[in-house]
Amino acid sequence: MTVQDPTTLLDGVLLRLRAMIEAGELAPGAPVREREMCERLSVSRTPLREALKVLAAERLLELRPNRGAVVLGLTERDVRDMFEVMEALEATAGRLACERATDADIAEIQAMHFQMHAHYLRGELEPYFQLNQAIHARIVAATGNAVLQSNYAALAARIRNARYLANRWSRERWDVAMHEHGLILDALVARDGAKLSEILAAHLRGKGVAVMEHLHAVDDAEVEAA
Amino acid sequence: MTVQDPTTLLDGVLLRLRAMIEAGELAPGAPVREREMCERLSVSRTPLREALKVLAAERLLELRPNRGAVVLGLTERDVRDMFEVMEALEATAGRLACERATDADIAEIQAMHFQMHAHYLRGELEPYFQLNQAIHARIVAATGNAVLQSNYAALAARIRNARYLANRWSRERWDVAMHEHGLILDALVARDGAKLSEILAAHLRGKGVAVMEHLHAVDDAEVEAA
DNA sequence: ACGAGAATAATTGCATGCAATTTTTTCTGC
DNA sequence: GCAGAAAAAATTGCATGCAATTATTCTCGT
């Protein structure tokens, strides 16, 4: 009669490990020692090892036979590749969402948009990002396409783990993004699928470019530090 | 010093299980009993159970807590959703492949195309399908985008498991598909990304429609049989 | 007979133990 | 001192055992 809501230990371990990776508590490149992590999560090696296999399948970890697991970081190429795929997925999502979203879906997204706008005006970066992600995910969900949704979510999760992407935006970039979000909402409300698709793709390309630039900036800084 | 090439037992089990599912040896809805499968694969429950978790993460199995694993079939909606996503991925692949494929890539795809055409002329369905799949996969690979490639491969694998999709084509449908493949090759050779993207999307939509129709035909037959 | 409920069997989830591999430490010879 | 080998320690991969849950069979009352 304990408080174990996650149906199984494995589920709990998966949730906790994913959270730790996303939080950066387990940084990219960090090895995951089994016994140590077992103690930390208070489970035996069996469910932990099962979780490691699953996370490796999700490309969050790499399993080196006989040599343990390490948290996967993202190379510049990974980021580029992922943005390209997300662009394709979001473009499709935009088109389909305009066809299939219920009015309630759109109303909800609209509400999120305004709330995000408020955070933007107040310069509250973190809540802004949170809602930003939520809006994009919500548009994808509004397509009613579960496969699209899960593929998108998997990519979003992987990208989120590269935390350096999130913070540090130029004011300009932020302004542009917010403006684009206005266009996104307009197209959605008008149910103009072609336009929404196009705007989402452009929006994501912009984001991708910004991220890549920032990646370079980080690299340069590291080079100088070395 | 046995002949165990797969680095680890888990890998071997994964390979064999995937093959069994794809071959229909494990039909959709069939439960996977652990001990039984362990005997069949000559491994203990540990690596088998790890494999089950991974396959569940890949949506090939469903894990019902305390009640074992079952092979997942595809609902009509699943098929529709998956074709929509594949269409998006292939369209993107077409565009990127035209930008980035090497001449060697294109030459190889061209060779596969002609070989496939030969099978078409001889009415050899199975080899045709094999090459058909290989060509699409090869175009995706030619983008150099590993994320795109793995997402595409995962979807293709899941769809392949619904084997009823494969056989049973109308002659017309086959002719149309072969014709479209000609256009695909032309666009690729001309490195016309926009066109290739468009053709691939249309090609996949056609395939999707054919599959859905066939699905309905199967359903109707089953209804009559009942 | 038939169905509800108890007893039994089978199955899953997890912990632990052991062998094989890898990593670290300690030795040895130069 | 130090590079390299040998030994020790640690870590992973896998098998097995046990408790808990689920499925099956049996029993008994109507």
Image: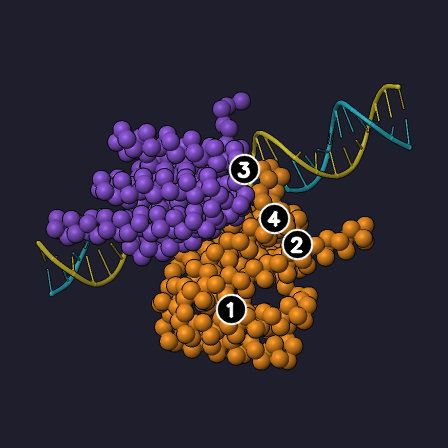
Chain colours: A orange, B purple, C yellow, D cyan
> Which chain contains the residue that carries disc 2?
A
**Amino acid type of the residue tagged 1 in the rendering:** Ala
Question: Residue A70, relative to residue A11: is it above or below?
Answer: above
* Labels 1 & 4 near each other (Cβ < 8 A): no
Residue topped by disc 4: A77
Residue at 64% x, 76% y is A124
Mark 3 or mark 1, which is nearer to you? 3
Q: Where is residue B32 drawn, in percent x and y?
A: 35, 44
3D distance between C-alphas at marks 1 and 4: 25 Å
3D distance between C-alphas at marks 3 and 2: 36 Å
Residue at 54% x, 67% y is A133
Which of the marked residues, 1 or 4, is nearer the chain's N terminus? 4
Q: Where is residue A94 drawn, in percent x and y?
A: 44, 64
3D distance between C-alphas at marks 3 and 1: 39 Å
- B1 lies left or right of B178: right
Question: Residue B110, relative to residue A146: is it above or below?
Answer: above
3D distance between C-alphas at marks 2 and 1: 24 Å
**Amino acid type of the residue tagged 4 in the rendering:** Arg
Q: Where is residue A6 drawn, in percent x and y?
A: 47, 61
> Which chain contains the residue that carries disc 3?
B
Mark 2 or mark 1, which is nearer to you? 1
Which quadrant of the structure image shows residue B182? top left
Residue topped by disc 2: A27
